[in-house]
């Protein structure tokens, strides 16, 4: 009966992130692996959800107001003018928005460009749709790419390029220069761009997130995906969206309707409240996350990790193992869980390319991703636990 | 070359996935053209209340509101995936606007205009307050998986492992999508019974399946056994069953299920069975294919919270299947939506633990509603086909002299002020459904009576 499983799904493996989470649970480890908060969701959002349930917003619905609020935000923040009536598809999280977008535009045999390292789920969606993922490596330590190199990855079969910025796992925020390079390539090759902007409000050091669709000639070929989850600490509510020109949005909607049909109704209502949060909310979000970033960067540095690239966005730090450390990333993380009681994610699961000669052979096994979307107490406790496993130089050693 | 299966040689499989890099070799599958889908029903119109879950509207690019930004250059030639080329939407766009314009009573929508029970809503509220707002475990909150397993045991007598055989999804719609995308290969033959809930055909098309369609016909929509037998072979991958059946209300009998089971065992065929209306079974007992001898090991049973507890917007569904099939479902699910709404899962666990008296009362209420509608439709002059389950009834509209179901439904909205669904959209060949329309009775009694009154006064036989 094993032969019954589809070929497409057999290519897919279970999320290593979820696997490790289970190990961490078994060991009672402090979880700095998965990217969701352990602090409460904002009270004004929870109250809105409770009201919605009580007021009977519990049947299938599409809350159009969300689209109007998003359209206003896009105009105000990015100068992108979209049609609230036709350009949005509300989905069960950015996960579903991305999956629906891929299914809407990728035919079997189409190539889709991704920057490497990459969040693992993109590839799986592309494969499920019969597409071919093609990886463009970002070079350590600053996760850069060369303009002239990028074009080499496009072929006549390239249908789309996926851009995740702010970036998971590195915390990179693609600069305007880089976005211009990407946009030029997309326009020359006449392909789509699909963006994952879930960390759009979580940027640091006064760095601002720039939406690829705001660059000249890009709106007409870009599908924007994002969600409430990270901005509002409600990863379990499953409210996300895709935004694209009307005819593309229509195709995405067609797919979405057959995958889930609609996003949870009461949380769509609560999204109206979320999306009307005052500017203060976004300021404190950034400030609080920046403090956490700084704290964790400092701890990791003191413990001997090499943090040569301080994240400019997202809730992750992609730290390189201490120089002296001979363990691979997976071995290190296992020890970290078992001996220090702290869980993080080995970086190898995010890499898909053969290392380039100039980058050295081994870097893909030397990175660990730490999430700092955790309360101060959690981060402090993690530090204390790790400090118990240091050698005479004060560096983490197993 | 495809990666080797996670299953060990002995057939048992393990869940320890390697953390090492995947090595992907290039796909060497020939390009397969997707099968041609018939008209696709979309939901999501911004202006109108959504219609039945299986009939929808969309704001297509042709009737979208004027573009806000006139200076944007026209988009490049659209290159959407071939799988979407044949999806059409216009019928329902028109009908939805008509419904609003004429203030029609909506007996087309497949969801209640009354709300779910307080004890379930309260459980969701408590979960939100208690901070259960972050990602749940991908395949379901443990409490819910257990509750689903317990309920399944009560209903079928089968003991299933909540950890290995239950997967929670965003509604049964997603369970269907995950099952098909996780278990069906391009080119696989899948048997479908028409009329069918429209997502089956759409997702089968997405998966590149080769659909073999068997039509169920009035008056009793019985399964044409010999025709089915002629279509099932060693090449058949799966048979999709929906019982109790949307739109006809038919319930598959034990004889029909045994016949299908026999064919499946002889030809090594899977069964995907959508049982969302199982608690709305009125004229006979609901029978789950999985409970038939030798069938659990080849069956995926799909269900959800929404219809049973009148909370269709919460999107809590599930698939129950043996581990080797669950694996495929979970793979697809994890990349379709990753996880399901957390607080609602906790509330769903509470709901499923409720006593049988809830279900008895549910049936009583719906029977009363059904009586109002059916008696009313008969008095008006429709030929009403017996519906054993679900909250739908299909009727023959031809006494009123319209050439097809869409024309009749338009008239019904414009001149009578009532909405029904033209069933031709539930068939691969729309001609087969042109005499039938579907009414729903998941509305409060005043609404049902109001609709019946309008039809009695304004609907005339020609």
Image (cartoon, coloured by chain):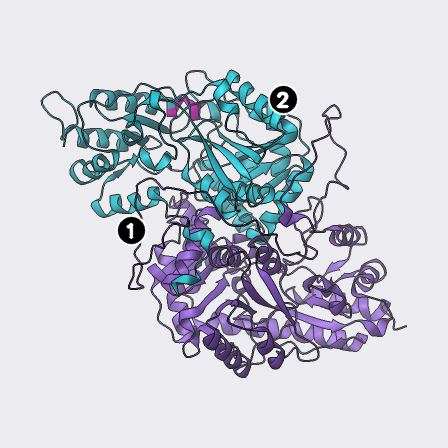
Chain colours: A cyan, B purple
What percent of the width, then of the height, locates residue B16?
29, 51
Asked if residue A129 lies left or right of residue A69, the reply is: left
Determine which residue is flagged by label 1.
Answer: B16
Q: Chain of mark 1?
A: B
Determine which residue is flagged by label 2.
Answer: A79
Tell me the magenta residue range: A284-289
* Residue B100 colored in magenta in the image: no
What percent of the width, then of the height, locates residue A340?
17, 35
> Which SS class for mark 1?
loop
Q: Quadrant of the C terminus of chain B?
A: bottom right
Q: Chain of mark 2?
A: A
Q: Main secondary structure of the magenta part?
A: helix
Front in this rendered view, residue B341 or A223: A223
Front in this rendered view, residue B267 or B94: B267
Q: Spatial distance from mark 2 to mark 1, Cα to Cα?
A: 47 Å
Asked if residue B325 lies left or right of residue A97, the reply is: left
Tags 2 and 1 both on a single chain: no
């Amino acid at each position: 009966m094993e032969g019954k499983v589809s070929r497409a799904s057999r290519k897919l493996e279970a999320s290593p992130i979820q696997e490790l989470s289970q190990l961490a649970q078994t060991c009672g480890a402090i979880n700095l692996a998965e990217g969701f908060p352990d602090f409460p969701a904002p009270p004004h959002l929870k109250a809105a959800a409770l009201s919605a349930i009580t007021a009977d917003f519990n049947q299938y619905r599409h809350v159009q107001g969300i689209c109007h609020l998003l359209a206003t935000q896009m105009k105000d923040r990015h100068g992108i003018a979209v049609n609230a009536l036709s350009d949005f598809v509300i989905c069960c999280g950015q996960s579903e928005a991305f999956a629906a977008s891929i299914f809407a535009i990728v035919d079997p045999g189409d190539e889709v460009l991704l920057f490497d390292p990459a969040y693992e789920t993109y590839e799986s969606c592309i494969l499920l749709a019969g597409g071919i993922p093609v990886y463009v490596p970002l070079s350590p330590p600053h996760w850069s790419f060369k303009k002239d190199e990028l074009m080499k990855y496009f072929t006549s079969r390239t249908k789309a390029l996926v851009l995740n910025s702010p970036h998971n796992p590195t915390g990179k925020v693609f600069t305007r220069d880089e976005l211009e390079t990407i946009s030029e390539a997309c326009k020359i090759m006449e392909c789509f761009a699909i963006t994952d902007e879930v960390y759009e409000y979580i940027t640091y050091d006064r760095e601002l997130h720039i939406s690829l669709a705001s660059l000249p000639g890009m709106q007409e070929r870009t599908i924007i995906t994002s969600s409430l989850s990270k901005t509002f600490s409600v990863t379990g509510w499953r409210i996300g969206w895709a935004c694209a020109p009307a005819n593309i949005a229509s195709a995405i909607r067609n797919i979405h309707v057959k995958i889930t049909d609609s996003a949870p109704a009461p949380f769509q209502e609560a999204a109206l409240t979320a999306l009307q949060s005052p500017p203060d909310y976004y300021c404190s979000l950034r400030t609080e996350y920046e403090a956490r970033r700084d704290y964790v960067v400092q701890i990791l540095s003191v413990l001997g990790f090499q943090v040569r690239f301080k994240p400019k966005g997202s809730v992750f730090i992609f730290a390189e193992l201490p120089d002296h450390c001979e363990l691979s990333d997976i071995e290190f993380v296992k020890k970290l869980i078992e001996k220090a009681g702290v869980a993080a994610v080995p970086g190898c699961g995010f890499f898909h390319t053969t290392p380039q000669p100039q980058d050295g052979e081994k870097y893909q096994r030397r990175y660990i991703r730490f999430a700092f979307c955790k309360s101060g107490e959690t981060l402090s406790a993690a530090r204390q636990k790790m400090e118990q496993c240091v050698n005479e130089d004060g560096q983490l050693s197993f | 070359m495809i990666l080797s299966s996670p299953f060990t040689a002995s057939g048992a499989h393990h869940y320890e996935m390697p953390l090492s890099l995947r090595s992907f070799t290039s796909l060497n599958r020939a390009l397969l053209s997707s099968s041609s889908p018939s008209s696709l029903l979309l939901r999501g119109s911004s202006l109108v209340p959504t219609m039945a879950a299986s009939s929808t509207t969309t704001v297509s690019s042709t009737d979208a509101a004027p573009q806000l930004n006139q200076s944007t250059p026209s988009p490049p030639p659209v290159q959407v995936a071939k799988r979407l080329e044949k999806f059409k939407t216009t019928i329902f766009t028109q009908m939805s606007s008509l419904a609003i314009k004429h203030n029609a009573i909506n007996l087309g929508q497949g969801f209640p205009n009354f709300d779910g029970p307080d004890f379930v809503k309260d459980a969701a509220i408590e979960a939100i307050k208690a901070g259960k707002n972050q990602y749940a475990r991908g395949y379901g909150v443990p409490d819910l998986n257990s509750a689903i397993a317990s309920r399944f045991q009560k209903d079928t007598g089968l003991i299933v492992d909540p950890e290995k055989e239950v997967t929670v999804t965003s509604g049964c719609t997603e369970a269907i999508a995950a099952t098909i995308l996780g278990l069906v290969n391009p080119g696989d033959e899948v048997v479908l019974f028409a009329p069918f809930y429209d997502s089956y055909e759409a997702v089968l098309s997405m998966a590149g399946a080769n659909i073999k369609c068997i039509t169920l016909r009035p008056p009793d929509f019985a399964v044409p056994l010999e025709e089915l037998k002629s279509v099932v072979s060693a090449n058949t991958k799966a048979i999709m069953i929906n019982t109790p059946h949307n739109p006809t209300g038919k319930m598959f009998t034990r004889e029909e299920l045994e016949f299908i089971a026999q064919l499946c065992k002889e030809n090594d065929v899977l069964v995907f069975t959508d049982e969302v209306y199982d608690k709305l079974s009125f004229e006979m007992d609901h029978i789950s294919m999985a409970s038939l001898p030798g069938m659990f090991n080849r069956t995926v049973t799909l269900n959800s919270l929404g219809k049973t507890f009148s909370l269709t917007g919460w999107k809590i569904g599930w698939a129950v299947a043996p581990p080797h099939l669950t694996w495929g479902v979970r793979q697809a699910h994890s990349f379709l939506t990753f996880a399901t709404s957390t607080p609602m899962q906790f509330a769903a666990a509470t709901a499923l633990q409720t006593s049988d008296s809830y279900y008895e009362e549910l049936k009583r209420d719906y029977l009363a509603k059904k009586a109002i509608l059916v008696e009313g439709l008969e008095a008006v002059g429709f030929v009403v086909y017996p519906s054993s389950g679900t909250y739908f009834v299909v009727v023959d509209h031809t006494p009123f002299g319209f050439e097809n179901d869409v024309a009749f439904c338009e008239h019904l909205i414009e001149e009578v002020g009532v909405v029904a669904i033209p069933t031709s959209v539930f068939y691969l060949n729309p001609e087969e459904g042109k005499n039938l329309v579907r009414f729903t009775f998941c509305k409060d009694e005043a609404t049902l009576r109001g609709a019946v009154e309008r039809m009695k006064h304004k609907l005339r036989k020609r």
